[in-house]
Amino acid sequence: MNVMRIIVSADYDEMSKLAAEDVAGIIRENPTVVLGLPTGSTPLGMYRNLITMHKQGNLSFRHVTTFNLDEYIGLEPGHVNSYRYFMYENFFKHVDIQEQNINIPDGNAADLEQECMDYEAKIRNAGGIYLMVLGVGNNGHIGFNEPADHFPIATHVTRLDESTIRANARFFRSPDEVPRLAVTMGIGSIMRSRRILLLASGNAKARAISAALEGSVTPALPASILQFHPDVTVILDAEAASLLTRNP
Ligand code: F6R
């Protein structure tokens, strides 16, 4: 039976706190858990809450393994807009996760096709992802699986949608500097995770959320595939939930 739990929180702070509590509970139950992680504005508050729990001595990441969803292609190593930099600055360097347990696609690999295959193999060898945390693009993308006429299965090189370039330009000096290509986990990589935690906040996400949760399942709105996953929790703030007709 498919189960999709939808939780509507008052605001971004409450969404972040609930998400962090969910992740922390899973780590406490299984300290060697394998997590899939997103970057972006949405999970920042969740990461801040997890760091606080760690600093208060309530949570250890010592035996946790992580796989990031995606990485830009062609930013030099250490670039402030790379997702590797984002993850270390906003999360990893503040907790006790072990370097060898952190996995992020290498957007500078000489052979990107090989890098994609190796990334899939690493996920498999780690026993698969237990909890995949996701944000969603204004256009309904998950990871960098952009609206398309099919669902890409495995980790692959993708061309960013014009709307994604515009949305992510806020972190760069100009839209021209946003890389056009990225490595991303595929829809299959995401759907094979045992559990999914989807987060969204703000009015800009309301259309994508209502289409993804209540519309047809279509690669034109990649997040809609989550309707087929057996164990999804969605935590929204009131704005992101505002267009749901079955607002819980
Ligand atoms: C990031 C990722 C993307 C973001 C999405 C939302 O690793 O995979 O799918 O989750 O673009 O981004 P924000 O949270 O910045 O609105």
Image (cartoon, helix red, strand yellow):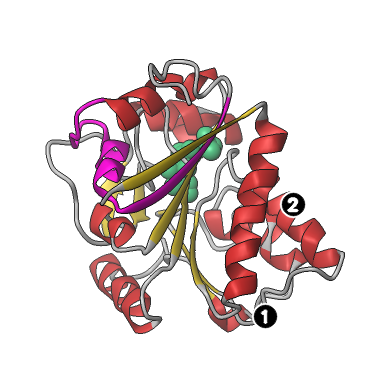
- Of the residues under marks 2 and 1, which one precedes in the sequence? 2
* Image coords of residue 239 (percent x, y): 56, 19
Q: Mark 2 and mark 1: span between their CA atoms?
A: 17 Å
Residue at image point 31% right, 78% down: 124
Residue to which mark 1 is pinned:
62
Could you say which quadrant of the image residue 91 lies in?
Answer: bottom right
SS under mark 2: helix
- For the residue pair 16 and 143, the one nearer the viewer reads as 16
* Image coords of residue 207 (percent x, y): 39, 19
Q: Mark 2 belongs to which amino acid?
A: Asn
Relative to residue 113, is residue 71 drawn left or right?
A: right
Vertical side of 50 occupied by 162: above or below = above
Is 224 included in the stretch rendered in magenta? yes
Residue at image point 24% right, 34% down: 147
Relative to residue 242, is residue 229 drawn left or right?
A: left
- For the residue pair 22 and 49, the one nearer the viewer reads as 22
Q: Which residues are magenta?
A: 215-237
Vertical side of 173 occupied by 159: above or below = below
- For the residue pair 223 and 75, the one nearer the viewer reads as 223
Residue at image point 79% right, 61% down: 53
Could you say which quadrant of the image residue 43 lies in?
Answer: top right
Q: Mark 1 belongs to which amino acid?
A: Arg
Is 33 included in the stretch rendered in magenta? no
SS under mark 1: loop
Vertical side of 118 occupied by 175: above or below = above
Residue to which mark 2 is pinned:
49
Residue at image point 35% right, 32% down: 140
Outermost residue, left direction? 149
Relative to residue 101, is residue 5 drawn left or right?
A: left
